[in-house]
Amino acid sequence: MNPDDRMHAALRAVADEPAPPAVTTLDQVITKGRRRVLVQRGATVAAVVGVVAAIGVGGVVLRSAAEGQGARPAGPPSATATTTTPGVPSVPTTGNQPPETTGAGEPSPTLLPGWHWVGVPADRDVGDDCKGGMPAGTAPDLSLPPKATVTETFLDAVGKAAGHPTLVDNSWEGYSPKTKSPHGFLDANVDMGDGPGSIQLEVDHFGGTPEAAADADLGSYGSCAPPSRTTLDDGTVLQLEQGDWRDPKLPMQHLRVYQPNGRLYIVTTAGYGKSDLVPADGEGYTITNGRGRLPVDAAGIAEIALALADLGL
């Protein structure tokens, strides 16, 4: 039995496991649309959060064996980056030059085998106000994939990466007033020992080619820290942002999956969970506590993304 067969067998094993009902609404999660980060938060643990999206995944070994473009990443992650002056992002001049970290105490970025660094174009703003470029094209008229299939695959991948997940929020809208398009959302919490971590999935779509759309989204999470990227044999592009450690107690990390059919999956990990959210005065939440670390490493979040890409939906 090959690795893909084993994975699909494991997916079927959890098909009958019921998911808990939704406990919040999508309006509490999505605010910026499909080209923006799901979460907006302040500079401290007590900052008020207008919308919350957080995801976490445990470390797993990736399934392929070759390096370079056109191949799936394989083997355990190897840290190749270095740490330099805090607050100074690095923009590589070549695809394999490692970036520099941007905050005191944060881990050095990990470059997975088969991935390469992608520098944010020099004409973009730098620093915390770095923004993405123009859309790569008109998004296709693409309906959402089957919710049951995506949920089963997502929860199975999260379970293998980070332990038993609890689905604490979900939404599957044929038309979302926030994104003006079909939009799906799943939020799974996992036990990190001293509290929950969050692993979330956003299901959307994009315009243009996968590579052009990934290029347009460089810097769209508010930092010019270069992401890493790999391209699968079918043309799917996976783009992994460096971890966001601007609040060391509430780290986050995002991975975007661009499929040739225009499907966009966004996986987000975060070092806090549903129970850490306290309603604030008016709209939004205050995050009262955080784990100070991510629920999974780069290999774990990449493995979850690969499971979704394998669906081909």
Image (cartoon, rainbow, N blue to C red):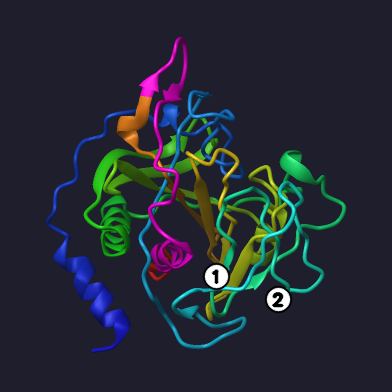
- Relative horizontal placement of residue 76, taking residue 83 as reference (left or right): left
In the depicted structure, whether residue 185 falls above or below residue 11: above
- Work out whether residue 136 can be spotted: no
Q: Position of residue 15 (x, y in %)?
A: 17, 60
In the depicted structure, whether residue 130 falls above or below residue 287: below
Q: Amino acid at mark 1?
A: Thr
- Could you tell me how far apart the alpha carbons at marks 1 and 2 are, in whole angstroms? 20 Å
- Work out whether residue 24 can be spotted: yes
- The numbered disc on residue 236 is 1
Q: Residue furthest top?
A: 281
Q: Residue furthest left?
A: 16
Quarter of the image with the C terminus is: bottom left
Residue nearest the observer in this picture, 61 or 26: 61
Could you tell me which secondary element the residue under label 2 belongs to?
A: loop
For the point 46% across and 49% down, which residue is it? Answer: 268
Q: Amino acid at mark 2?
A: Asn
For the point 27% across and 30% down, which residue is it? Answer: 23
Foreground disc of the pair 1, 2: 2
| Magenta stretch bounds | 278-306
Q: Residue furthest right?
A: 123
Quarter of the image with the N terminus is: bottom left
Residue nearest the observer in this picture, 220 or 269: 269
Could you tell me which secondary element the residue under label 1 belongs to?
A: loop
The residue pinned by badge 2 equals 96
In the depicted structure, whether residue 149 falls above or below residue 201: below
Residue nearest the observer in this picture, 164 or 212: 164
